[in-house]
Amino acid sequence: MSAAAVRSRVQVSASAERPSPLRRGGLASRIRQGLFNNVHNTVLSVVMLVVLGYVGWHTLRWAVLDAVWHADDAAVCKQAAGACWAIVGEKYRLILFGTFPYEEQWRAFLAVVLILVLSIASGFRRLWSRRLLLAWIALLPIVLVLMLGGVFGLRPTGTHLWGGLPLTLIMAIVTVAFGLPGAIFLALGRRSQLPAIKALCIGITEITRGLPLLVVLFMAAIMLPLFLPTTFRIDKLVSAQIAMVVYFAAYAAEIVRGGLQAVPRGQYEAAEAAGLKYGQRMRKVILPQGLRIVIPALMNDIIRAFKNTTFVSILGLYDILGATGAATQDPQWVQFAPEAYLFVFALYFVFCFSMSKYSESLSRHLSQGRNY
């Protein structure tokens, strides 16, 4: 090798090992280079810092320093200069549990606790086991017994009395639990070689995706009973749940189909060469890889399904957002509705942010050692 080539390689190696300007120095150096590296950036940074400081200070005073945290009478809040968080303490039962009977709200609270405990446990990969799966399978009948009552001495409670956070969580979990398998079947059916199955899956997916969720909910609540015998009445909550499942399945099906198409063709050929049947190829080779690829997009759809539960309020079902709207109708507290909605916003943010971070962690874990 010539001397020039050796010097070139040494220079390339040295430049690769040399840290970038943004990585040299401490935090103060990075801030100076990123925000105050020239006159224009310095002026803009100073203006933004002043604005953020002004807004942040007034927000802190309104939300914390001058806020009213507890009051038995709304008149106390009217005299205060800050936020009235006392409305949450005054109306939290109606916000969290809707019109569920007051004396029986411990059942709804227990149902929420069970759902949250299993959800948190599922976030730890070392707890993944057959027992955890069986616990999730047993969760639905236990929650239904707690919410419906009528057995074990529990007072019967119709679904028209359900509301608040339990209704939101139950609808979201059932939507994903039944909609995800439906999405997989629709995605596989759309790639089927059988024309009838392929046309049926395409029709269901495209028609559902072409309609707003509100229209699907109205069709499930109004049109579906017209095709059923007059002696058979479908519960309003059940019809709304069916609409949510179908809507989620139609959107998630395209995500799953994208994941199946992203799996290298060699994986299909290798599974077929190994003598695996179609079901075995899909279950053991193709689907695990395809679903791993689309975890971020799939979790985005799951988060959207969780937030879409607010639309059931148009059918007279009081989810946590609808229950909050009902709670703020009290004439004494109506002017403090923004604080109540900010509380609900915080709940939604905690749930959605947690799902987003879990999706990121899971995707990163499953992608280790993968080249595609």
Image (spheres, grey):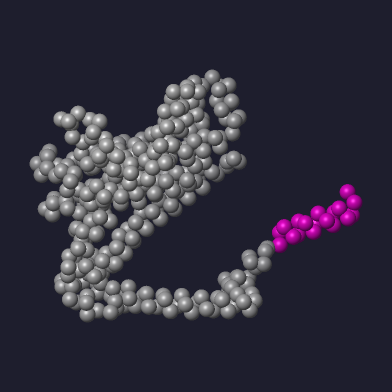
Q: Residue at x 21, y 59 (%)?
A: 326
239, 221: nearer the viewer: 221
Q: Which stretch did the figure color magenta? A: 1-18
On the image, the x and y values in percent for residue 253 come to 44, 37
Question: Residue at left 37%, top 40%?
Answer: 247
Residue 112 visible in rendering: no
Quick check: 311 above or below 41? Answer: above
**Residue 275: x percent and y percent?**
54, 19
- Residue sitting at the far right: 2
Q: Main secondary structure of the magenta part?
A: helix
Residue 261 position in % (x across, y down): 54, 35
Locate residue 147: give its quadrant.
top left
Q: Is residue 244 magenta?
A: no
- Residue 217 sits in which quadrant? top left
Residue 10 belongs to magenta span:
yes
Q: Residue at x 56, y 76 (%)?
A: 44
| Total numbered badges shown on the rendered structure | 0
Which image quarter: residue 220?
Answer: top left
Residue 315 seen by the camera:
yes
